[in-house]
Image (cartoon, rainbow, N blue to C red):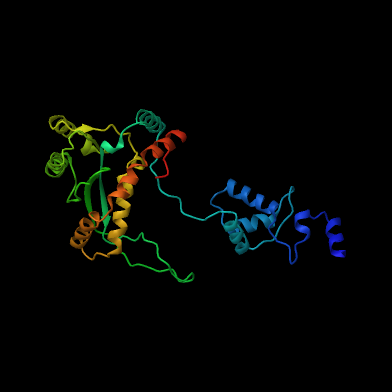
Amino acid sequence: MCRYLQKWRARVPVEEVGLVGRPKKITDSTKKQIRSLISANEHISSRGISAALATGSPRREAIKVSAETIRRNLVEMNYKHSTPLRVPKLTEKQKLRRVEWCKKHRKFDWNKVFFSDETSIELDRCKLRQWHPKAKRPTKATPKYSSKRMFWSAISATRTCSLVPVTGTLNSQGYIELLGTHLLPWLAENRLQQHYFQQDNASCHVSRLSQAFFRDKELKILDWPANSPDLNPIENIWGILKDAVEKRAPKTLAELEAFAIDEWGKIPLQIIRNTIASMPRRINQVLDRGGEKCDY
């Protein structure tokens, strides 16, 4: 009874009266201070937060809390200490163009589009996560400059084009030869000439030579906003392919190429369909964010 009386005199909140044991060092008030410190400086470390709390100010008393306790509470507060994801830097003009494009294509039939792109796969890629004892982070020896192989392909909701290895720099003439050799016969074989062909605004894609080729072959090119890989579903499929190739640990570029072609054929069409089906959500996110990158 005496203990409860002491808590009442100390104005302890009712919900905390029945609690036993040592009181928490980090109260709701302290958590609010921690959030304010992070808002003012997102790069502040747990040690920095500990030092700031210990210093105090005219408006708040000093609190001594260890950096370890702060880290534990930050996890409970749903915070995570991570390196920012690198995303394309969009100009105001590009954001406006993206918004205009999204408004125009809100009700577009994405099942009639072939999304294309090039990508490079590193021989010594090191992106896969793995489980390990907390105190022993694994290492992977990689050369300073890793060899890589470039590939091109296209996907749709019904079919995927073959994965084409690209050697050297892909210029306009090489791009035209690639499409003429791999895309056009494949479109004709599957009677898909009426589909739209999507490509980004790389120089070899939008050159006068390439544009003349598209007109001559009567390819329907989908208008595409600059700096918008987040809107292209094939980017997500590239990620799946790269992870699958890394798991097979190729030792040479020849192995990397063979593994990539093999794994490309194993990607389920349903996964590709689901990725393309996300186009309306991507568009809505870009519109909601005023042209900024979507979460895909």
**In which quarter of the view is residue 77 placed?**
bottom right
Residue at 17% over, 32% down: 214
On the question of residue 240 being in view, the answer is yes
Picture coordinates of residue 83 (x, y %)? 46, 54
Q: How many numbered circles are shown?
A: 0
The N terminus: image quadrant? bottom right
Residue at image point 59% right, 61% down = 72
Q: Is residue 11 above or below residue 207?
A: below
Is 89 left or right of 9, judged from the image as shown?
Answer: left
Give the side of residue 172 with respect to residue 43, left or right. Answer: left
Q: Quadrant of residue 128?
A: bottom left
Instruction: Using the image as rendered, state which of residue 162 and residue 150 is in the foreground.
Output: 162
- The part of the image, by quadrant, that contains residue 106 is top left
Residue closer to the observer: 32 or 215: 215
Q: Is residue 163 above or below residue 191?
A: below
**In the picture, which quadrant includes the C terminus?**
top left
Does residue 145 show up?
no
Residue in the picture at 42% in, 32% down: 92
In this orientation, which residue lies closer to the viewer: 184 or 253?
Answer: 184
Horizontal and vertical percent for residue 277? 35, 42
Q: Is residue 219 left or right of residue 280?
A: left
Indicate the position of residue 110 as horizontal and vertical percent values. Answer: 30, 37
* Image x and y of residue 185, in percent: 12, 42
On the picture, is 42 further left or further right than 4? Answer: left
